[in-house]
Amino acid sequence: MNLWRLVNPLILLDILFASGLGVLLFSRVNEPRTLWLLRGYLFLVSLAWFVQRFANLPVTSKLVDALVLACSLSLAILWQGELRRLMELLGTGRLAVLLGNPQKEFQANSSTVNQLTEAAGRLSQSRRGALVVVDMGSDLRPEDFLYAGVPIDAQFSTELLLNLFASDTPLHDGAVLVKGNRIISAGVILPLSRQGISRYGTRHLAALGITERFDRCICVVVSEETGTLSLASQGRLERPITSSRLLDLLKELSGAAMTSMPPKAGLNTSNLANSPNPVDVPQTPSKASFGKQSSKQESSQ
């Protein structure tokens, strides 16, 4: 009892909140370089607090404070997209997304993944441009896009996706938004990325732009000019990839419990593997690191 009287409950509460915030920050950081920046910044903040609290060093304290301020401004510039996203989530009350706890509506089953791969393969063979955004927990809203598109809200199917990207339909130039096992909308206009402007076309820049802002969404891209298949995730693009490689990446990134299912009759995987189309460039047996990009230039779509 005497020990509990000596302990200040406010100090315990302070330590609890600080620890929870630290765990949340570090759990949301995936890239090693970003993690190093965050560790260095927290070290400077701790050093400034220690000097002000326990050391009577006014000059050193002023220098450390100035260094912390400069680093804070630098990080605000570097992480402006992440900070904007944080304020959006806090303002809309989407705490489940902030805490990294996606709802069941974002979990796609193996049938949907197989149908998406089949549709992408058929679009690639016919060289019909396509852009599919798969929301895996970012809870994308209409205000997250330049144009929210036309609501569809239909069960995902290969035939429906192929019809949406038919060249004679008014929605084929935009993106299709997929959540879980449903197609939410079509004709969506995405924000463009500023990286690789001279290398990639509009579809690839749109895929990079949306995945830079939202870390739990991926984009499947089919080039209209070459039929090349690509996959964008966290602002990085892997291309060109085969249909089998796309299926492996979708299973890996979606995190769903996939069971081995035979492809539908409309998709002949053996023919795809032997096709001379650029989408079927042979891959090495070991999985390449995500984001490895081809040196092949592509003109604007």
Image: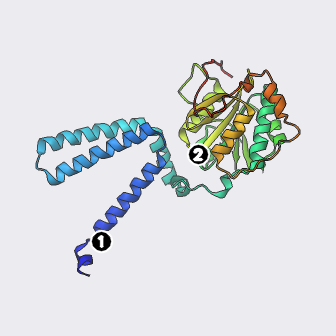
Q: Residues within 10 Å of mark 2 (few under 14, many from 20)?
A: many
N-terminal of the pair, mark 2 or mark 1, is 1
Q: Is residue 238 above or below residue 225?
A: below
Q: Where the C terminus falls, by quadrant?
A: top right
Q: Is residue 171 left or right of residue 195?
A: right
Nearest to the observer: residue 281 or residue 159:
281
Residue 167 in sight in this render: no
104 in relation to 192, above or below: below
Q: Nearer the viewer, residue 6 or 275?
A: 275
Q: Which quadrant of the figure has residue 177?
A: top right
| Residue extending furthest toward the front | 285
Taking 258 as reference, is 46 left or right? left
Give the side of residue 140 with respect to residue 21, left or right. right
Q: x%, y% of residue 35?
A: 41, 42
Residue drawn at (63%, 48%) of the image:
136
> In the image, what residue occupies the spot 55% across and 57% down?
96
Residue at image point 81% right, 24% down = 275
Query: Is 211 or 241 nearer to us in this picture?
Result: 241
> What residue would you read off at disc 2?
216
Of 23 and 180, the residue lying toward us? 23
Residue 143, can we see it?
Answer: yes
